Image: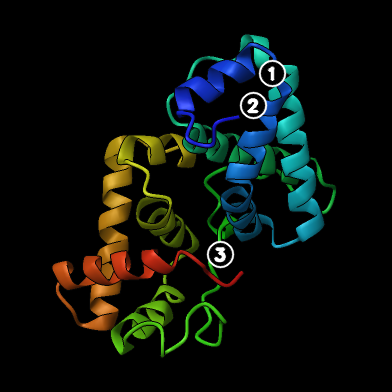
Amino acid sequence: MNPELSDTALWSRLLNGEEDALDQIYKVHFQSLYQYGMRMLHQEDEVKDCLHNLFIKLWENRKTLNPTTQIRYYLLAALRNTIVNHRTKESKYEKVEASDEYLFDLNFTLESAYIRKEEINQKAVQLAAAMNQLTPRQKEIIYLKYFEELDYSQIAEIMDLTTKGTYKLSARALDALREIMKVDKTSLVLLLLELNKLHKWHI
């Protein structure tokens, strides 16, 4: 299959029952989904089980799925719902709501093999440390906005917020980072974009 196939065409092939389309979707998006899942569950086996269930359902329900032009966004939203349902069913958890604060954790570490001083400047290292001081929900919106590069309407659906609420949460997260780092908004956004180039975060 053509690796340059558009999301629309690839999804259409899946809806038509082409197994190689499902295989390519899995290969292209697994790493992004795995990293996002680990930040919610922190247990590799459970994350892989959720991913397995997600792709099984994707295949089984292919005839009833709606068309999409953005597969990654669709899968991130579906995985979040899968994980919330998984946690609700687990006897060790009480009823879990999608909005619960503790659901998301980026766990940035300066010792990460992917965040080394020789790779990024000192300000970026400080930003990684500052991110650890945000609430889980603030971390999640920064991650989805600046590292998954989703727009606010997509983030709103994934995080079960209104679009207005998404803007407010993002603004609070950026304000918190600015206050911690003592930098202006433009400098902060540039640092986030710089870290996005690495796009490899320690889990």
Callout 3 crowding tier (Cα within 10 Å): few <14, some 14–19, many ≥20? many
Looking at the image, is 35 positioned above or below residue 61? below
Q: Please, what secondary structure does the residue beneath circle 3 have?
A: loop
On-image quarter of the C terminus: bottom right
Q: Which residue is mark 1?
A: 18
Residue at the image point whose x is 23% and y is 74% from the top: 178
Residue 177 in view in this figure: yes
Q: Please, what secondary structure does the residue beneath circle 2 have?
A: helix
C-alpha separation, residue under disc 1 versus residue under disc 3: 36 Å
Mark before the other along the chain sequence, 3 or 2? 2
The three-letter code of the residue at mark 3 reads Asp
C-alpha separation, residue under disc 3 versus residue under disc 2: 32 Å
Q: Nearer the viewer, residue 168 or 155?
A: 155
Q: Nearer the viewer, mark 1 or mark 3?
A: 1
Asked whether the beta carbons under mark 2 and mark 1 sit within 8 Å of each other, the answer is yes
Q: Which mark is residue 142?
A: none
Looking at the image, is 100 positioned above or below residue 71? below
The three-letter code of the residue at mark 2 reads Ala
Q: Which residue is mark 2?
A: 21
Q: Which residue is mark 3?
A: 105
Asked whether the beta carbons under mark 3 and mark 2 sit within 8 Å of each other, the answer is no
Name the colouring of the figure: rainbow
Residue at the image point whose x is 60% and y is 57% from the top: 35
C-alpha separation, residue under disc 2 versus residue under disc 1: 6 Å
The x, y position of residue 151, in whole percent, is: 32, 41
Asked whether the beta carbons under mark 1 and mark 3 sit within 8 Å of each other, the answer is no
Q: Nearer the viewer, residue 48 or 169?
A: 48
The x, y position of residue 48, in whole percent, is: 77, 49
Residue 97 in view in this figure: no
Q: Please, what secondary structure does the residue beneath circle 1 have?
A: loop
